[in-house]
């Protein structure tokens, strides 16, 4: 969703700057991705201007992200332009940049509609052999498979004792919850299991004090985008901007 190299071989996590993260969340209060990065303790460096910010550190790597107004971002980029950055598609490409990639950010701040199968969802242990087998067979290219150090914990749903769906929660501060690697057994798809797992996680985390629940998708994954939209997640397209030489 951000540069592919960050997903396949993520860089070692740099030490976050809590003060920069808190300031980012305070400056861009309506930007849920900025909120997720700032309140989630993911920001390692930030620059601030009038109604805009640039920061490094997100759920998917340490590349630069921009938020705020287009004019404000342009002024910050005039001072020092990174070779690549990601920003909301609605802002357009900054001058002197070309399109590099695109992805979708999905977030909500209020509980989603209750799903019929939520009662069958619960927390899992990472070494659960059913979990390892399900992800390996149903989603071998999962962004954060079992054993990935970015994952805090796993959760999933069972039908008649069989694990049919699961997902990971990434490591963040408690004010933010990030879902990753949603996996559903092919034989159980289109029966509401993905919605149940996603809704249960969002509801549980919001009840526990999270202010933002979020996740990312590839732009071509229309099935997932429709699912998250039905659950109340706002769909905010992002694009990757690459500086032209």
Image (cartoon, rainbow, N blue to C red):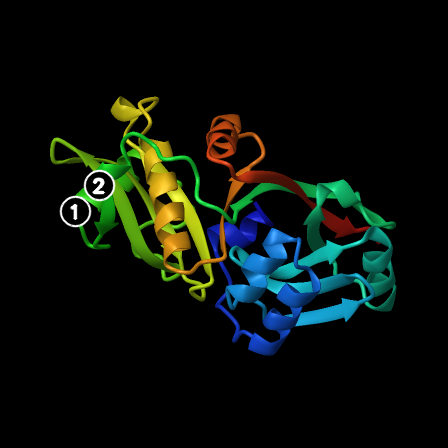
Residue 225 in percent (x, y) is at 52, 32
Q: Residue at x 23, y 38 (%)?
A: 119
Q: Secondary structure at mark 1?
A: helix
Q: Residues within 10 Å of mark 2 (few under 14, many from 20)?
A: some
Residue named by callout 2: 133
Q: Residues within 10 Å of mark 1 (few under 14, many from 20)?
A: few
Query: Residue 41, relative to residue 215: is it above or below?
Result: below
- What residue lies at 38% left-to-right and 54% top-to-bottom? 207
| Between 60 and 71, the one nearer to me in the picture | 71
**Observer-nearest residue: 213 or 135?**
213
Q: Which mark is residue 77?
A: none
- Viewer-closest of 100 and 130: 130
Vertical side of 22 occupied by 86: above or below: above
**Is 125 left, or right, of 102 in this rendering?**
left
Check whether the beta carbons of the residues at disc 2 and disc 1 lie within 8 A of each other: yes
Q: On the rendered structure, is 163 left or right of 109?
A: left
From the top left corner, tell me how far across and down residue 21 is, in percent: 60, 70
Q: In the picture, which quadrant includes the N terminus?
A: top right
Residue 139 in view, yes or no:
no
Which residue is at a point 57% across and 39% down the rendered structure image?
Answer: 234
Q: Can you give x and y, in whole percent of width and height, for residue 129 in the image?
A: 16, 47
**Does any portion of residue 47 appear in the rendered image?**
yes
Q: Residue at x 45, y 66 (%)?
A: 173
Q: Pointer 1: what residue?
A: 129
Q: Residue furthest left?
A: 161
Q: Is residue 18 left or right of residue 171?
A: right
Task: Tell me if residue 88 comes above or below residue 118 in the rendering.
Answer: below
Position of the C terminus, as image quadrant, is bottom right
């Amino acid at each position: 969703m951000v540069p592919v190299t960050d997903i396949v071989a993520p860089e070692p996590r740099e030490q976050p700057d809590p003060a920069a993260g808190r300031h980012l969340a305070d400056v861009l209060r309506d930007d849920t991705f900025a909120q997720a990065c700032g309140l989630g303790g993911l920001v390692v460096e930030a620059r601030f201007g009038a109604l805009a910010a640039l920061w490094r550190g997100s759920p998917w790597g340490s590349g630069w992200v921009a938020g705020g107004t287009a004019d404000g971002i342009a002024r910050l980029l005039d001072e020092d332009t990174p070779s690549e950055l990601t920003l909301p598609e609605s802002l357009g490409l900054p001058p002197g940049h070309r399109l590099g990639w695109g992805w979708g950010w999905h977030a909500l701040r209020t509980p989603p509609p209750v799903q019929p199968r939520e009662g069958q969802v619960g927390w899992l242990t990472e070494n659960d052999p059913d979990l390892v087998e399900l992800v390996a067979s149903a989603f071998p290219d999962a962004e954060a498979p079992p054993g990935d150090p970015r994952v805090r914990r796993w959760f999933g749903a069972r039908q008649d004792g069989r694990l049919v769906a699961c997902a990971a929660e990434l490591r963040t501060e408690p004010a933010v919850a990030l879902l990753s690697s949603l996996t559903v057994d092919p034989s159980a798809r289109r029966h509401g299991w993905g919605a149940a797992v996603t809704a249960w996680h969002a509801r549980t985390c919001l009840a526990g004090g999270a202010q933002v629940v979020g996740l990312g998708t590839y732009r071509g994954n229309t099935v997932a985008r429709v699912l998250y939209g039905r659950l109340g997640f706002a769909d905010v397209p992002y694009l990757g901007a690459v500086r032209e030489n």
